[in-house]
Each structure stands twice: as C-alpha cells, then as structure tokens.
Amino acid sequence: MIRTVSTQAYPDQKPGTSGLRKKVRVFQQPHYAENFIQSVFDAIEGKTGATLVIGGDGRFLNREVIQVAIRMAAANGFGRVVVGRGGILSTPAASNMIRIREALGGLVLSASHNPGGPDEDFGIKYNIANGGPAPEKVTEAIYARTRDIAEYRTVDAPDIDLDAPGEVQVAGMAVEVVDPVADYADLMERLFDFAAIAQAVDGGFRMAFDAMSAVTGPYAHEILERRLGFPAGTVRNGTPLPDFGGHHPDPNLVHAAELYELMMGPDAPDFGAASDGDGDRNLVIGRGRFVTPSDSLAMLAANAHLAPGYASGLKGIARSMPTSAAADRVAAELGIPAYETPTGWKFFGNLLDAGMATICGEESAGTGSDHVREKDGLWAVLLWLNILAATGKSVDQIAREHWARFGRNYYARHDYEGVETERADALMAALRASLPSLPGRSFGPLTVEAADEFAYEDPTDGSVSRNQGSRVLFRGGSRVVFRLSGTGTSGATLRVYLERYEPAGGDLDRDTPDMLRDITAAAEEIAGIERHTGRTAPDVVT
Ligand code: G6P
Ligand code: ZN
C-alpha cells in the first residue's frame, strides 16, 4: 500500500527560530509540505511502531496538512498517530500530549502569532520526545535532508474524520482522535489552586480573556468558565477561526489594543489576559497596569511558591538573552541559578530536562515551566490568578511591591518590520564590526562598559550557538540589544531591545519611553538605523 512519490528539493526549507514558517502560497506548491514532513521523518530514528502526536492552531491549511501527515506517518512505519479533535492542539497541549502518550515526537502545525488565511502564514514544527521543539542538531539534520530529498512515502487512504473522536486504522496504523483540551486542563488543575481561584471568582473577582479567535478559545472556555466559574463572556473571541477573524493573533499592546483599552478604562475588570495563535504566548494586564513579559517572568518566579505545583520552590530561572535582567535579581534573592540563553524556547529544553531550571521566560511574551517543554499562555494566566487569589492583592500592588524590593528594569522592544534583507544584513554587519571599538565610548550620558556578540554554551551538552544578537552594555546596568527576527516570512525584522535598570528607592513608577530616551538615542547612534533602513521610527513598540 506504500507509495513512493518522486519530488524535487526546495532550497528554502530551513527551519527558523520556531520551525518552518512560510506563506500559505509557498506551502501550496507541489509536494512542499510533503518534502518537509518526509525530511523530518528521515532525520529522526525509532519511528517503527512509535507514536506521533499531530495537531495545530486551526489556521488555514491545518486540516489538509494533517491528512497528508497522517498518510505519510503510516507509510513511514509509525504505529499510532494521536491527533486533536478538529485538528486542534495548542502548542503547550501538544507538548503535554507528547509527554503523557510517550510519543516519539509531534508535528505542531502553526505559524504562532503570525496572521492566517490564504494569503498569510502557515508553519510546521517538529517536537521531540520530551515535548519540546527539536534542538538545533535535529533542525539542521532536517534542513540538510530537505536540500537533497528526491522522494517521499505515503499511502493511498482516504481522509479520516477529524471531528469524530475515537480510533480508526489508516493502512495498518492506528489513528486516535482525542479531546484536545481535557488532559491539558487536568494538568493545570494539578498545578494550581483552582479552589482558591474559584473562591475569588465567587467573591466578585473578574477577568477578561482574549483568545484572539485562535486556539486557546476552547481551552479558556473549559478552564476559566467551566472549571473556575468565571461568568460566560469572560472569554472573548473564543472560537478558533482559520484566519483569526482577519486579525494578527499576537498578544501585545498593538494587536490586543481593545483589551488594553478595556483594562485602562473605567470598566476594567481585575485582570486581563490574551494568548496568541497557538496558545503559547501571553499578555498580562492588571486594572490600570500593564506588566511587561520580562517583569511578568520575574514576578511569577518571585511568587510561584504560592501555587501548589511550585510550593517546594524553584530549581533555577532561565531567560533568553534579550529578556530583561529582572528575573536574575529574583534568582539571586532566592539563591538559585539564573541562566541566559539565546532567543527560542528550544534552548530551555535541556535545562528543564536536567532539572536545572523550573521557570523560563522570554521578552516575546513567553513564560512557562517544567510542566511541559513549550511556553504556555494559559499557564502564565493561571499562575497569575493563583497568586492574586492567594495574596488578595491587585496586579498593580504586586508590581509596585516587586519593584520596591528588587528595583525596576524599564524595558521596551522596538521592531522595524519588512526591512529589505540586504539592508538589515548590512546594518548588523556594520554593527558587529564596530562592537570591539565601543567600550569606553559615551553616548549622551551613557558610557559603554562592554559590547559583544552573544554566544551560548549549553551547560548540559556543551553545544555552542554563536551570533545570537549584538549587545551593548552600559555602566549602571542599562543595555541595548540588536538582533534580526528568526520568525518572519517577508523581508527582515530588526529588533532593538532597550533596558534601563532603576534600583530600589529610585524612580520606580515613571513613563517607560521617558526613562528609555537616552538609551533609544544611543541605539540609533550606535547602529545607524535610519542611515541603513531609511526608517525614523519603529513599526511596533512592545
Ligand atoms: C517564537 C519562539 C520564541 C521566540 C520568538 C521570537 O515565538 O517560540 O521562543 O522568542 O519566536 O522570535 P524572533 O526570532 O522573531 O525574535
Ligand atoms: Zn505562539
């Protein structure tokens, strides 16, 4: 029944920060998805009889690619495919499913926070047996295979009914259509004090959750409204749509502006949150108080012991390099190690597997823990809810008390999107070349203490990742970091990460742009953003 189909390699199937992401039209080229999926299967061992988890964020092309992947899994010797009903599995739920089903790995179909629809983005990511994104040595092997692939294997079998729970056979392989929500919701219920949160809800505590017409809708309905008792309507935009209702499912102040306005207005509930296309990112806003992802990581780490799943304390805290150093101060106070990794959740996997870190986070709105091997939007929301319920404090109060104790890392990210690739590369090359000459130079009131190109040596396996962003550190703990995004699908996106540390007792509740003015000016002078790109202002500030 197995059919071998000849194909031609595509030159552009290099996985980025988080899997292969391309325009839907690119994926619709003949055999494009098949080539990549076969390259994944060729790059991994132990497929015979093994279990593979498949699911996605419900975006345009999700169902079609799942059917293709199921047939190819059967032809490549897998014994079982576990797929979420409707083709749905949020990224953290997929990670959990891989772990509890002891699968060899999983295909997560998503382009995360990128828009969906026929003219927008699609993506395929392979996660390994620990539930986390494949590490670089695996993605490199996959990419190498895509360059010389000449055939793929499939079977002749009809599409399965993705909406019918239960088990069917596809060419001798079992395919199980499972509830995408239940196991994940159970896991959350074990980690957090649902009774305490439900009691706060009974007492009138209210929240708004914006699922952005993406994958977290069904999860949030079940957990927030059914299990925790928040009133119906708490979850907004709760039905996953193939084009996310035409919106950009990225939970930041630009794309979740409605939620932000609600939370800053007179009718704000106690707590506001949103998650992205595939459910791994989070946005957290208290009544009248936005919490940056870097601060959220630090505040969650400082208070995690209030949740049952973390009552025995944290083993360590890890953050990506561009994420602010706020979490490092918490780690120092707790007497536990702090790790600084390159951008990309895959770099946390080894630290979590080795029991060196418990909580991880990134400036790009990702926070998570060792409960799965992906960042987890609803997990962050629930940990915040648990902390608010346990302390009876508001988000604003938690934030102010945190800064009073640890000082505040004022922080912003400036994105310059759709820059011509050559121009962006030229900027980065010139910047890199100038780094050795920067120490000792002054830019306005700021003096450079050190400047380098970030490289990371994984403490568990010694693997080294170079060229992970240029950083310029100023005296007094302020800094600017420059890197090019690894997740875009058109042109280049320049990210400029600005951070200023204000110690406890200092100016702790000022306007962020004001506090970052000198660093923003220094960043322009150091990198020549306008000269290289013609841009005088960023497209998105988060
Ligand atoms: C994805 C990854 C994250 C990463 C983010 C930023 O969401 O899962 O781990 O931080 O992309 O990537 P970028 O390369 O666009 O800055
Ligand atoms: Zn995502």
Image: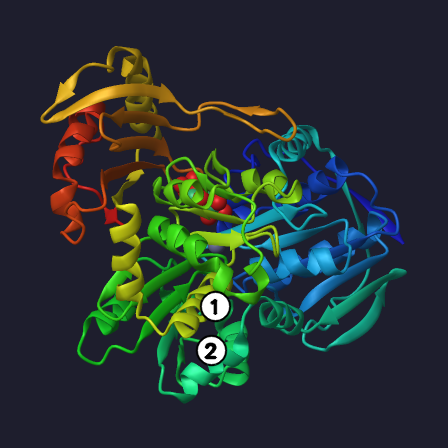
Q: Quadrant of residue 155?
A: bottom right
Amino acid marked by disc 2: Ile
What is the count of numbered marks? Answer: 2
Provide the secondary structure element on which disc 2 rests.
Answer: helix
Tell me the number on the disc at residue 437: none
Q: Quadrant of residue 62?
A: bottom right
Residue at the disc numbered 1: 382
- Location of residue 320 in the rendering, given as x and y in whole percent from the top left corner: 44, 39
Residue 488 visible: no
Circle nearer the N terminus (2, 1): 2
Report the residue at 46% width, 61% height from top: 380
- Location of residue 387 in the rendering, given as x and y in whole percent from the top left corner: 43, 67
> Mark 2 to mark 1: distance in Å?
9 Å
| Cβ atoms at labels 2 and 1 below 8 Å apart | yes
Q: Badge 2: how crowded within 10 Å, few (<14), some, or many (20+)?
A: many
In this picture, is 239 found above or below 149? below
- Location of residue 80 in the rendering, given as x and y in whole percent from the top left corner: 82, 59
Tell me if 94 is positioned left or right of 394 in this view. Answer: right
Nearest the eye: 53 or 59: 53
Give the farthest residue toward the top: 437
Report the residue at 25% width, 20% height from top: 449
Q: Badge 1: how crowded within 10 Å, few (<14), some, or many (20+)?
A: many
Tell me if 492 is positioned left or right of 42 in this view. Answer: left
Amino acid marked by disc 1: Leu
Residue at the disc numbered 2: 197
